Amino acid sequence: MVSKIPHKILLEESEMPTQWYNVVPDLPEPPPPPLHPGTHEPAGPDDFAPLFPMSLIEQEMSAERYIDIPGEVLDVYRLWRPSPLFRARRLEQLLDTPARIYYKYEGVSPAGSHKPNTAVPQAYYNHEAGITKLTTETGAGQWGSALAFATAQYGMECEVWQVAASYRQKPYRRAMMEVWGATVHPSPSELTEFGRALLAEDPDHPGSLGIAISEAVAMCVGDPNTRYALGSVLNHVLMHQTIIGEEALLQLAKVDEVPDLLVGCTGGGSNFGGLAFPFMREKMAGKMNPTIRCVEPAACPTLTKGEYRYDFGDSAGMTPLMKMHTLGHDFIPEPIHAGGLRYHGMSPLVSHVYELGMVEAISIPQRECFAGALQFARTEGIIPAPEPTHAIAAAIREALACKESGEEKVILTALCGHGHLDLAAYDKYLSGEMVDYDLPDSVIAEAMESVPVIA
């Protein structure tokens, strides 16, 4: 019997959500506040003012459940939104599973990932505040590409510090940013005091997101025309991404489906929060009861192995302290880790709901992720970015468990980007060069030694 559920579930442009969802007011306990790095007192708007325009600071600290999306942002969103929701029917057939697997595909954006969902509003609000230039960091290059695209929409400058290992491995990511007008540097760089010190110790330093953040922040502070933009972690960033989950709710409703399991890859938390938070709202309201599962790499397991502590968001200790799961702001990920999801910390909001027991977390080694990616690509046709391969692997695990048990679960994930510029990682896997890396506890303990002790 052929299912009546279509392979592709679309929304009309007129059905695109016009508000972002802020999960904070609905949580049973408020998340711990960020702290000033010097006084360890709760950070206020003035502490964030050197980095962000006041409109974004207000969103970061907002207690409003819904925030209207400006019309100028919706106009840019319409270049690719609403994004499609697919039923992975051919993957289901390969796995011979009774499970129904759905994926929300964010690779249709100009930058090829979910990142423009927040890059565009961040550029817009800065432009409205009279800011002419944004600085940022990028790891795998998805975020830098998205911000370069977004700043181009508003005639702004964009300067990007790309983690050196990624800068060397992915020259076409740099080229993509430069096509949209951005200036790109490997990090650590000779442009900042912090970068010069690291390069003096190791001229081939692989870099980290924490280091790149420090450099981007250092080059922004003190210039009244420049601000900093962050691609994940912070509350306002996750809120901008909730358009993913809001659209997915509408699309599943069109086919009378409700997820039993929601899985999302989790690095800094923006893709996961963007998909999961609207479904978490419905779960808290008693309208559905999905299991919500974070999936992270075994090489950078912040939720499953990190400590829940106040820590800096950057390696130089320039940012406010955030209560989050962390591997320590001095943590340097292994260059053999092929994908993104390399950040030392986890979004404070995702960390908070994990501590409340509202979500689960697992880590998966990269060879299993790429094996699942090949199954996905050879059935569904899309080559996934390395990041969502973690969620694909978790979805496949669950689908095979359903095959054993006979359960007809509905599994939902977000395919947060395509892997067209990540084929070097696939080449390593196909040639047998890719190895798994399980982060040793000793490495975490060493990185945690520099984490502040907050009374």
Image (cartoon, rainbow, N blue to C red):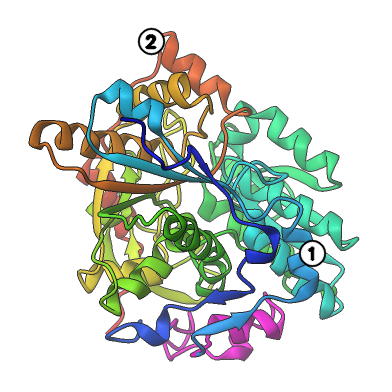
Which quadrant, please, contains the N terminus?
A: top left
Residue 284, quarter of picture: bottom left
Residue 241, quarter of picture: bottom right
Residue drawn where x is 53% and y is 61% of the image: 247
Residue drawn where x is 85% and y is 58% of the image: 153
Q: Nearest the camera: 7 or 21?
A: 7
- Residue 153 in the magenta stretch? The answer is no
Indicate the position of residue 110 as horizontal and vertical percent values: 73, 44
Magenta stretch in the rendered image: 34-63
Residue drawn where x is 47% and y is 57% of the image: 254
Indicate the position of residue 308 as horizontal and vertical percent values: 27, 68
Q: Is residue 46 left or right of residue 77?
A: left
Label 2: which residue? 432
Q: Is residue 266 left or right of residue 360?
A: right
Residue sitting farthest toward the top: 431
Callout 2–callout 1 Cβ contact below 8 Å: no
Label 1: which residue? 75
Indicate the position of residue 77 as horizontal and vertical percent values: 72, 59
Closer to the N terminus: mark 2 or mark 1? 1
User: Dot 1 lies on which element?
Assistant: helix
Which quadrant, please, contains the C terminus?
A: bottom left
Judge whether 434 appears above or below 222 on screen.
above
Residue 302, quarter of picture: bottom left
